[in-house]
Amino acid sequence: MLTVQNLSKRFGGLLAVDDISFEIQKGEIFGIIGPNGAGKTTLFNLITGNIPSDKGQVRFQDHVITGKKPHQIASLGIGRTFQMVKPFGGLTVEQNVMMGALPRHKLFADAQKAANEVIDRLGLKPYAREEARALPVGLKKKLELARALATQPSLLFLDEVMGGLNPTEVQEMMALIRSLNRDQGITICMIEHVMAAVVALCERIVVLQQGRKLAEGTASEVTGNPEVIKAYLGGDVAHAGA
Ligand SMILES: Nc1ncnc2c1ncn2[C@@H]1O[C@H](COP(=O)(O)OP(=O)(O)OP(=O)(O)O)[C@@H](O)[C@H]1O
């Protein structure tokens, strides 16, 4: 579904993404892990057109999307959330989700209907008329996801949607991600530091370190890889359930 080939990005003297290649298959949940600063978010930004790449190519279905603008990439069916949730604070939850829905619908009323379906599905209905800035972090993360879903993606990039959530909210978010994948057929690529969630959800995982691909494989292959344990997992391996 998505092929990333030799993608690279330099910020001054720093090679933030260094010759990364991988493929995401239709229907899977794919994970990207690695220490802070490994280049994960930069990789997302390159794929979704938020920053230009220096080298390499990204193909989505039959399209080369390298060099396209974020809204063009979104209209092809690639959605994303941002790690630093940035809802339009002064707007309501419904208005924020409308931002995602509007480009998909000719009529305002249709966009509103679609936005409210997503709001319902994510359990945000009681907050639909509240200002986004008033929401606690768990609901802000859900709103971020709702906004991305309203763009009707077939491939969804999730950047640390579990970050800042309590254990109950993590369980709820995991169930939601699984349902989006299984029931709605959305292919998912997730950056995540909560290893229990990565191990439980992801069929395949890529590990980044200092911009480079350190490993790729199933959850058990990756969590059992001594280089990955040294570079990233450390004492967390037991916690990861490996
Ligand atoms: N716009 C930018 N200008 C300069 N350096 C940047 C920029 N964006 C990211 N970097 C640097 O690139 C490297 C990779 O950053 P990135 O945010 O992609 O890492 P990450 O793996 O997502 O980290 P984290 O897990 O902390 O979110 C870091 O050293 C970061 O400081």
Image (tube, rainbow, N blue to C red):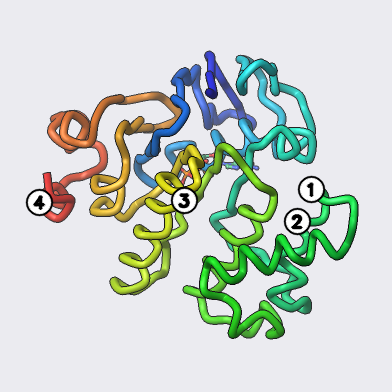
Front-most of 164 and 80?
80
Judging from the image, what secondary structure is the residue with disc 4 in? helix
Quarter of the image for the C terminus: give it.
top left
Q: Mark 4 or mark 3, which has the lower sequence index? A: 3
Q: Position of residue 11 (x, y in %)?
A: 62, 32
Q: Which residue is mark 2?
A: 101
Q: Mark 3 or mark 2, which has the lower sequence index? A: 2
Q: Taking the image as drawn, is residue 58 in sight?
A: no
Distance, label 3 to label 1, CA atoms, is 19 Å
Q: Which residue is mark 4?
A: 238
Which of the 4 image quadrants contains residue 28? top left
Number of marks present in the image shown: 4
Give, as a three-letter code, the residue at label 1.
Arg
Q: Position of residue 211 (x, y in %)?
A: 45, 29
Distance, label 1 to label 4, CA atoms, is 44 Å
Mark 1 and mark 2 residues within 8 Å of each other at the beta carbon: yes
43 lies above or below 213 = below
Which of the 4 image quadrants contains residue 202? top left
Q: Which residue is mark 1?
A: 104
Q: Residues within 10 Å of mark 1 (few under 14, many from 20)?
A: some
20 lies above or below 205 = above
Q: Residues within 10 Å of mark 2 (few under 14, many from 20)?
A: many
Closer to viewer: mark 4 or mark 3 = 3
Q: Is mark 1 within 8 Å of ligand 1?
A: no
Q: Which residue is mark 3?
A: 180
